[in-house]
Image (tube, rainbow, N blue to C red):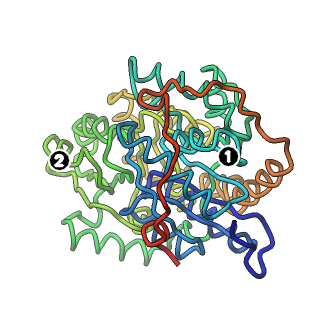
Amino acid sequence: MPQKKRGQKGPTVLHVSQPSDGGVARVVTDLVRHQTEAGMRVYVACPPGGVLSETATEAGADVLLWHADRHPGLLLPQEISGVRRLVRRFGPDLVHAHSAKAGLAVRLALRGRTPTVFQPHAWSFDAVDGPAARLALRWERHATRWAHRVLCVSEDERQRGQLAGVDGPWTVVRNGIDTEHFRPADEVARHRARARLAALYGVPVDAPLAVCVGRLCRQKGQDLLLQAWPAVTDAVPDARLVLVGEGPQRDTLRDTAAENVVFAGESPDPVLWYTAADLVVLPSRWEGMALVPLEAMASGRPVVVTDVTGARESLPVDHIPDCLVPPEDPGALARAVSTLLDDPGLRGVLGFQGRHHIRARYDVRRTADEVIRLYDEVLTDEPVEDTAPQHSPVPGTARVPADRSAPDDRREHVGR
């Protein structure tokens, strides 16, 4: 087992994440930065591609290669064996599994033998329907015995799991964002951002502009926003919409989008888009607590979000009538977006209030401090006893073979 490095002041932590971009990658990177600054040794295991391997390395982590697909399938036994191999070789004091796939592989691999924190970042059973949803819920109920703590990013997410029968050892640490990086821009910066959009995408500098930042996928609901958009432009004819992100639904969305919708592709830092926007929209179908509304409000921009897990909790109470709409309701979405795009005075008030709300409640430094305190609590708790039978409700994992392969240093350790 590796020795503590010189100057190390805290435990060694292994973060495991299948998502290597988007909000989960930003959360992991923020935690890594804070933990390494606190003197901890931090590893991050993630698949190749995406931005996480680069941003986690820059934040001070040792990045390890973990081959993992987004969905359960034939590769699951290898993914489980990969986790076991990394834990054996690098000897973390605690493993922090992020999102559904890492939560699946880590808990099956370790079964509570190493202190384990599972952070859903939105429940897996909300992402699917029918038999798949029932299977995912059955798994989450089963697997909580192998987590020393289930870390939820909102009280709403905790209640959603508890009401669904996921009886875990809960802790809620709300998502946070860098309130110094995301902050209101002055008029000069705003004019430059709008001029850049005009040059790159032909967006008029004075057009009312709605921006949606997120992976182009069913979860984020851009298809619902495109359904709502004709009604928005009927009410606000000069309005423009920019979709920032990439994802599996890009081609389908482009086929249904109006001419006044811009697809801007992936952006490593959405500050430019928040600076240029009049309004930020996130019409998600499910979340834990989305980062985009927090970032937008910190930047002084009002938001319109759907009433999914964590959304109501993230807004100032007075913003709910104007900024929160039912999920999967393009008509309500169009009315809220149209009203705000057509009312600069209301946007200004909401933007000012939102900035102060985020600074007071959702600073990432507070979030990261609370996670370190959670680690301290977990490491002083009694160990989880693996009293469950050696079978799983997940198809294909009833008998996960022992990992007899020798570790390959060059393939596992890819950062720093």
User: Dot 1: what SS?
Assistant: strand
Q: Position of residue 213 (x, y in %)?
A: 39, 53
Q: Which mark is residue 117?
A: 1
Left or right: where 101 falls relative to 389: left
Q: In which image quadrant can residue 204 be found? A: bottom left
Q: Residues within 10 Å of mark 1 (few under 14, many from 20)?
A: many
Comparing labels 1 and 2, the label whose residue is closer to the camera? 1
Q: Tag 1: residue type?
A: Val
Q: Nearer the viewer, residue 151 or 293?
A: 151
**Considering only vertical position in the picture, is 69 above or below 244?**
above
- Residue occupying the point 25% across, 34% down: 227
- Residue occupying the point 37% across, 28% down: 328
Q: Position of residue 374 (x, y in %)?
A: 77, 51
- Residue occupying the point 53% across, 62% down: 299
Left or right: where 205 falls relative to 61: left
**Considering only vertical position in the picture, is 313 above or below 204?**
above
User: Dot 2: what SS?
Assistant: helix
Q: Position of residue 235 (x, y in %)?
A: 27, 39
- Residue occupying the point 69% across, 70% down: 2
Q: Position of residue 167 (x, y in %)?
A: 69, 25
The N terminus lies in quadrant: bottom right
Q: Is residue 292 visible?
A: no
Q: Tag 2: residue type?
A: Asp
Question: Which residue is under mark 2?
Answer: 251
